[in-house]
Image: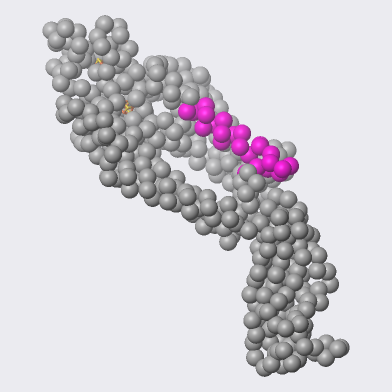
Amino acid sequence: MTQPQTVPIKIHPRLVSGRFNNARVAMVLLTQLIFFATPWLQWNGRQAVHLNLADHHFLIFGISLWPQDFIYLAALLVVSALGLFLWTAIGGRLWCGYSCPQTVYTQIMIWIERLTLGDHLARRKLDAAPPSAGKYLKKGMSHGLMLVFALWTGLTFVGYFTPIRELAVGRMGPWDLFWTLFYAAFTWLLAGVLREKVCLHMCPYARFQGAMFDEHTLIISYDDKRGEPRGKQQAKAQGDKGCVDCGICVQVCPTGIDIRAGLQYECIGCAACIDACDQVMDKIGAPRGLIRYTSAHALQGKPAPSQSLHRPRLALYSCLLAGIIALSTTALALKKPFKVEVLRDRATLVRATDDGWLENVYNLHLTNTTEQPQRFELNVEGLPGIRLDARDRQIAVPPAGNETIAVRAQVAPEHAGRGAHDIYFVVRSHTRDGATVREKSSFIGE
Ligand code: SF4
Ligand code: SF4
């Protein structure tokens, strides 16, 4: 990779159109539709995605996750990371160019700027203009609109953690307000002010993703064999197929680099320069592709092997991904629809009942991990004749709710000698196909 180039203080990329720009716009719309719409979706009469940190309960489209289930969230994070590694090894910086939130929000902020201040030339002119009330009014209006949009994103983000319908009518606590403002300020600062500097100087992924590249990874590159020497005359001499040195590929670049200087880490793979150069080539009647998606392998003039997807690192990422997805989905499918915790009452080790039996006291904590109400039947086993003297052996627990009840296990003295004996609390759900949980505990004899 070549050394970083000097870039202007503020980059105002020229508007570009073309197939890759269309793909980028489509990704902006798709990702924002998902982000803004998801907290409004309902599932069984409740918010479909609700990450309730206060109650340690995550609800995701009918799947209830409690602190004990955070292994699934860890698996989801590992799958996302491995998916990104696999995608990067195949497609290079496609993630950065099309779907990274920094790219997406920067694109939206540039649209707002274009709407309020005009095209790239007008914006550059305004930047260069001496300080005046008019200049600051225009800039203030532009940033004001960006802040409104950023506030909307902040409110939506907090809506994943606090019911968004309550936030929308102004029912928000001080922490909700704090995080809404914090997220809004963060979005405005990163996408509205810092923009490409985040990719160039702050993003760690930009630094280490080169380690995932190999000679078959998709890159955006200028074909210098075809393009050089550049210039109108030289291009004519080459049959109008070379670079006419119009500089439009540099003007559209959101990071302000010249792709003709070679592969650079500042290139976020947005393909704006491909669209720009293709248009120039169309105008001069030359074949497209002077700047194009290619690979280091193809650039060296080697024939593109049909099995370029058969690479050890791809096989490794794919196997790991498939393994983790298979394991976690199987575990999720087999997950019990409720959880039982048994806590011995340590204040009362053992006592005698009126009829002379021995009695231990326990607290049973039942958690309904589904989105339907459940009724449970409690039993105990493990010692001859052991019985349960619960106030109510039929317990109803609301959807995604929990109940703690005190129960007393009783055993005849001849079956519970001195010391601890293993016993089992058996909890059966009446409403979930008779699902049963058997939880071990101990009974202290006389
Ligand atoms: S060099 Fe091309 S692909 Fe890379 S960031 Fe600039 S415009 Fe986008
Ligand atoms: S847009 Fe194409 S022709 Fe124009 S300077 Fe860039 S590479 Fe050369």
33 is within the stretch colored magenta: yes
Q: Residue at x 70, y 50 (%)?
A: 371
Closer to us: 333 or 60:
333
Question: Which of the 4 image quadrants contains residue 435?
Answer: bottom right
At 44% across and 51% down in the image, what residue appears?
324
Q: Is residue 123 visible?
A: no
Q: Position of residue 246 (x, y in %)?
A: 25, 13
* Quarter-of-image position of residue 395: bottom right
Q: Residue furthest front?
A: 384
**Magenta segment boundaries in residue numbering:** 27-49
Query: Residue at 27% of width from left, 45% of height from top?
Result: 312
Is residue 429 shown to the viewer in this render? yes
Q: Position of residue 272 (x, y in %)?
A: 35, 22
Ligand 1 quadrant assignment = top left
Q: Decide if residue 278 is on the left or right side of residue 433.
A: left
Q: Is residue 429 magenta?
A: no
Vertical comparison of 119 with 439: above or below: above
Residue drawn at point x = 81 percent, y = 65 percent: 394
Percent x, y for residue 167?
Answer: 69, 41
Protein image colouring: one colour
**Which secondary structure dominates the residues rendered in magenta?**
helix
Image quarter where the N terminus lies is top left
Q: Is 8 located above or below residue 425 in the figure?
A: above
In the displayed structure, does residue 190 sit left or right of residue 420? left
Relative height, residue 311 to residue 231 (above, below): below
**Relative to the observer, which residue lies in front, 345 or 331?**
331
The x and y percentages for residue 190 are: 45, 37
Depth check, front residue: 258 or 215: 215
Please identify the quadrant where the C terminus is shown: bottom right
